[in-house]
Image: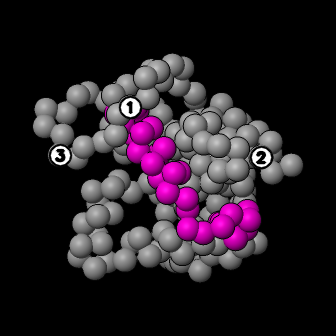
């Protein structure tokens, strides 16, 4: 089977995604139901909420990028970074597929590629913050992260609230 059915009922072929198949409702719903850290955090924390937080830390002209920086995961799932890196080392082109999907999403929503470096930097700062606030401390972290945000992540949204907030922010940024 080379297709998936999205939340809105569309049958799409993720490896041949077209602009007209990309739907912000599908993206918001899928990301709101994907848990960060492959579910290994202390409580459910959605990719949608992570994207909202990245968005909020960016200048106005980059906020849509921040909101949509992980949008491809709505069609690929959230494969954790160590697996993505291994696939790349083994010459299995996971990043190629993810990048191809992101090209379609960017085109659909008028984003200019490549994703700005500051979005990736803010994403890493948020990763450090999320790791500090949502995970148990690793005994020997193998990768250094930038300093986390000074503020602690306060309230964590349910998947339903994260989906609603994601769609609301998208509407604000694109209207």
Residue drawn at the location 50% of the way across and 71% of the way down: 99
Identify whether 165 is placed above or below 82: above
Identify whether 88 is placed above or below 37: below
Residue drawn at the location 57% of the way across and 27% of the way down: 157
Q: Nearer the viewer, residue 33 or 123?
A: 123
Quadrant of res 167? top right
Q: Is residue 33 visible?
A: no
Q: Horizontal and vertical percent for residue 14? A: 56, 72
- Name the magenta segment's main secondary structure: helix
- State how far apart marks 3 and 1 are (Cα): 16 Å
Badge 3 density bin: few <14, some 14–19, many ≥20, Cα 10 Å: few
Q: Is residue 127 left or right of residue 10?
A: left
Q: Horizontal and vertical percent for residue 109? A: 73, 62
Nearer-N-terminus badge (3/2): 3
Query: Disc 2 or disc 1, which is closer to the eye?
Result: 1
Identify whether 16 is placed above or below 56: below
Q: Nearer the viewer, residue 92 or 109?
A: 109
Q: Is residue 117 left or right of residue 170?
A: left
Report the residue marked by disc 3: 142
Q: Which residues are magenta?
A: 105-131
Query: Helix, strand, or loop for circle 2?
Result: helix
Indicate yes or no whether the magenta region holds residue 162.
no
Query: Residue 173 got which mark?
Result: 2
- State how far apart marks 3 and 2 are (Cα): 37 Å
Nearer-N-terminus badge (3/1): 3
Q: Nearer the viewer, residue 43 or 84?
A: 84
Q: Is residue 128 left or right of residue 104?
A: left
Report the residue marked by disc 1: 148
Q: Horizontal and vertical percent for residue 40? A: 33, 37
Q: Horizontal and vertical percent for residue 159? A: 58, 35
Nearer-N-terminus badge (2/1): 1
């Amino acid at each position: 089977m080379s297709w998936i059915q999205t939340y809105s009922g569309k049958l799409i072929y993720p490896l041949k995604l077209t602009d007209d198949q990309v739907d912000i409702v599908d993206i918001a719903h899928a990301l709101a139901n994907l848990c960060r850290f492959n579910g290994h955090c202390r409580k459910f924390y959605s990719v949608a909420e992570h994207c909202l937080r990245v968005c909020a830390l960016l200048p106005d002209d980059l906020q849509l990028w921040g909101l949509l920086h992980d949008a491809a995961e709505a069609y690929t799932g959230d494969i954790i970074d160590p697996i993505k890196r291994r696939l790349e080392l083994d010459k299995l082109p996971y990043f190629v597929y993810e990048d191809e999907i992101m090209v379609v999403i960017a085109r659909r929503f008028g984003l200019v590629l490549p994703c700005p470096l500051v979005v990736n930097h803010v994403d890493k700062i948020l990763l450090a913050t999320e790791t500090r606030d949502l995970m148990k401390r690793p005994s020997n972290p193998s990768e250094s992260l930038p300093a986390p945000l000074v503020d602690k992540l306060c309230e964590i949204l349910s998947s339903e609230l994260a989906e609603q907030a994601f769609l609301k922010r998208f509407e604000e940024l694109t209207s």
